[in-house]
Amino acid sequence: MSEQQPDSHDGPFDEFDQIVAAESDRDPDLAVIEAGSRTLRAQAGPPQADPVPAPPTDAEVARALAEVEQELATRWGETKLEPSVARIAALMDVLGEPQRAYPSLHITGTNGKTSTARMIEALLNAFELRTGRYTSPHVQSITERISLDGAPISAERFVETYHDIKPYVEMVDASQEYRLSFFEVLTGMAYAAFADAPVDAAVVEVGMGGSWDATNVIDGSVAVVTPISLDHTDRLGSTPGEIAQEKAGVIKQGATVILAQQPVDAAQVLLKKAVEVDATVAREGMEFGVVTREVAVGGQQLTLRGLGGEYDGIFLPLYGAHMAHNAAVALAAVEAFFGIGADHARVLDADTVRKAFASVSSPGRMEVVRRSPTVVLDAAHNPAGAAATAEAVTESFGFSRLIGVVGASEGKDVRGVFEAFEPIFAEVVVTENSSHRAMTADELAAVAVEVFGPDRVQVEPRLDDAIEAAITLAEEEAEYGGAGVLVTGSVITVGEARLLLRRG
């Protein structure tokens, strides 16, 4: 568990637990090497290939996609929920239960779900399995949510899938007290698209919670629980333990459960549920974990302990200790999917694992999109995520001066987010995104001033003006390009900033 280490072990894990507990300690003599690698990374710029799909070039396809999005927008949004799987179950029934046509890995938790899903997908693809991945929310394009073989489905296929299931959606709408929601329809589309492909495995991220989440009509042979912290407390609970009660709903009879490091109360709930349904549990820091981790140019170099043994020489082109932990969870999940650690005492092919991790991308998660000054995007939107991002930025870039651009959604713990970033932001520019759920810049500023003081807060309601102001503030620091900008606070803010910066 993340907050407690076992007092003792009788077996071979004693040394491993000590390594996990001190994984980030490094020889002080490496400081000079690290400083050099940080400078190189700051100059490296964005990757050449963009993993986010571009808008359709065909005007007719673009029009059709816009029409589908407009129809979906007439439904309940993702923040309006009626805690039941009755509607999505009814849709699956009339569609012929497409979600049962393939085995699934089901991912819940508070932070790290999408990045972990992407890593699982990359590993399964590397072992020549055809995959479907369903994640949310999207960064720029709604088509990102449904992927086949590691790439978002085309706009044409997205439109076709919607029209294929639309008559069945309307049948269910007519028979239920409430129409299917935006997220429920998308979930139905994903499951139908995966069955139609067909895929060998589906990697499915919950939208919110677990038990009554629309995705929870699958029986995941592997259930993954990323770190649980406080978010959506109005719907899920006010403590990690209460939130875990809902998220434990993805743990099904006889499944294998991969648990990231958890708060003690959350771990107790999850382990109790696993016992109730006779599930097998693997815990980070016990049965698997991060053995060593070193900052490297463009990411980090890892040795991971999986369920079957160790894998060394893994390069992960993502920043931060939290991403290393996500990688360990993803590796254990794929081993469990292949029966390693239970039916088979072996390891996966190490070269294939290395190739898979080296290919991973996670748009909008510690993503460098510009240099001179370096601009980093990260979708942290709760205090735990912000703390992980702050640690990752400090470790991986070593900026001499960092300017924050923050745009958040209503209902979020923005004070907690600001407090996590306060030690690393020289100044913060508060702004707002285009969502109807966005907090106004003035509302954000009122909280920011209480945390940073008035002299360190600038208000720019337009996101493009906020980014320009932050870059100007960063450029005032004349220390050989050692300044940077971090855009954060919301996936929507990050997605809109990404569009602006990549067009620039």
Image (spheres, rainbow, N blue to C red):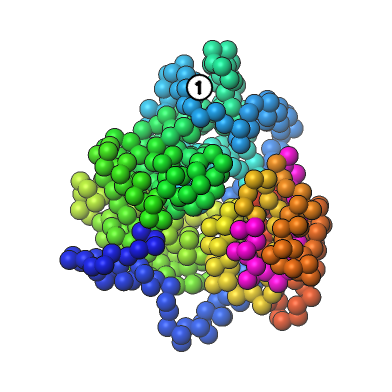
Give yes or no for residue 416 being in the magenta stretch: yes
Which span of residues is magenta-colored? 415-436
Vertical comparison of 23 with 76: above or below:
below
Position of 481 compared to 275: left or right?
Answer: right
Q: Residue at x 29, y 60 (%)?
A: 286
SS label for mark 1? helix
Q: Which residue was labeled with disc 1?
A: 87
Tell me the kind of residue under disc 1. Answer: Arg
Placement of the N terminus among the 4 image quadrants: bottom left
Task: Give the x, y percent position of residue 185.
Answer: 56, 27
Residue 228 vertical position relative to residue 468 in the rendered view, above or below: above
Give x and y (percent) for residue 137.
59, 42
Q: Which of 156 and 230 is in front in this view?
A: 230
Q: Can residue 503 be seen in this view?
A: no
Q: Specify few, some or many for label 1: CA neighbours under 10 Å numbering under 14, 14-19, or 20 or more.
A: many
Q: As displayed, is residue 376 above or below residue 152?
A: below
Which picture quadrant has residue 501? bottom right
